[in-house]
């Protein structure tokens, strides 16, 4: 499941602004909050292009959202020194 940075921050136990600040320190995000593409982020993070209708301009406005893959969440946790524990999926038919 892919996550935006807000959901990624929540999964890592951080606030959104704190995660973005730390990603800027690691030079994964630019000062404008854009993803700096490089070998460090390949397959872990990507830009999801989106658009919305702008009534004032009577046209679509396009923007990108930084997204993180599941592998990217684990990689970011390692880069930030955060321990993430995962639970195995529950078996169908088993009772807790």
Image (cartoon, rainbow, N blue to C red):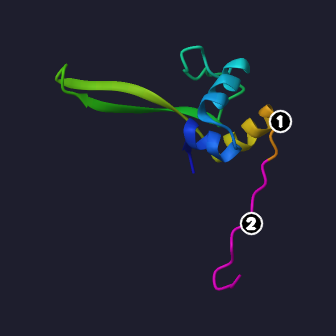
Q: Quadrant of residue 49?
A: top left
| Mark 2 element type | loop
Spot occupied by residue 25 in the image (x, y as percentages of width and height): 72, 18
The residue under the point 66% across, 23% down is: 21
The residue under the point 68% across, 38% down is: 14
Farthest residue to the top: give it. 31
Is 54 a magenta residue?
A: no
Q: Which residues are magenta?
A: 84-96
Spot occupied by residue 87 in the image (x, y as percentages of width and height): 74, 63
Spot occupied by residue 52 in the image (x, y as percentages of width and height): 29, 32
| Badge 1 or badge 2: first in the primary sequence | 1
Q: Are marks 1 and 2 in contact (CB under 8 Å)?
A: no
Is 88 a magenta residue?
A: yes
| Mark 1 element type | loop
**Quick check: 90 above or below 19?**
below
Q: Quadrant of residue 51?
A: top left
The residue under the point 40% across, 25% down is: 63
Distance from Cα at disc 1 to Cα at disc 2: 22 Å
> Horizontally, is 71 left or right of 48 in the view?
right
Residue at the spot of label 2: 88
Q: Which dot marks residue 81?
A: 1
**Quick check: 44 above or below 27?**
below
Dominant secondary structure (helix, strand or loop) of the stretch shown in magenta = loop
Residue 4 shows in this picture? no
Q: Quadrant of the C terminus?
A: bottom right
Spot occupied by residue 91 in the image (x, y as percentages of width and height): 68, 78
Residue 50 shows in this picture? yes
The residue under the point 83% across, 35% down is: 81
């Amino acid at each position: 499941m892919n996550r935006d940075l807000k959901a990624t921050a929540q999964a890592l136990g951080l606030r959104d602004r704190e995660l973005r600040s730390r990603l800027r320190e690691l030079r994964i995000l630019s000062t404008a909050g854009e993803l700096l593409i490089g070998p460090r982020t390949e397959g872990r993070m990507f830009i999801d292009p989106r658009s919305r209708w702008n009534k004032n301009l009577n046209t679509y406005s396009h923007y990108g959202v930084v997204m993180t893959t599941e592998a990217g969440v684990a990689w970011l946790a390692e880069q930030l020194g955060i321990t993430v524990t995962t639970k195995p999926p529950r078996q169908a038919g088993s009772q807790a």
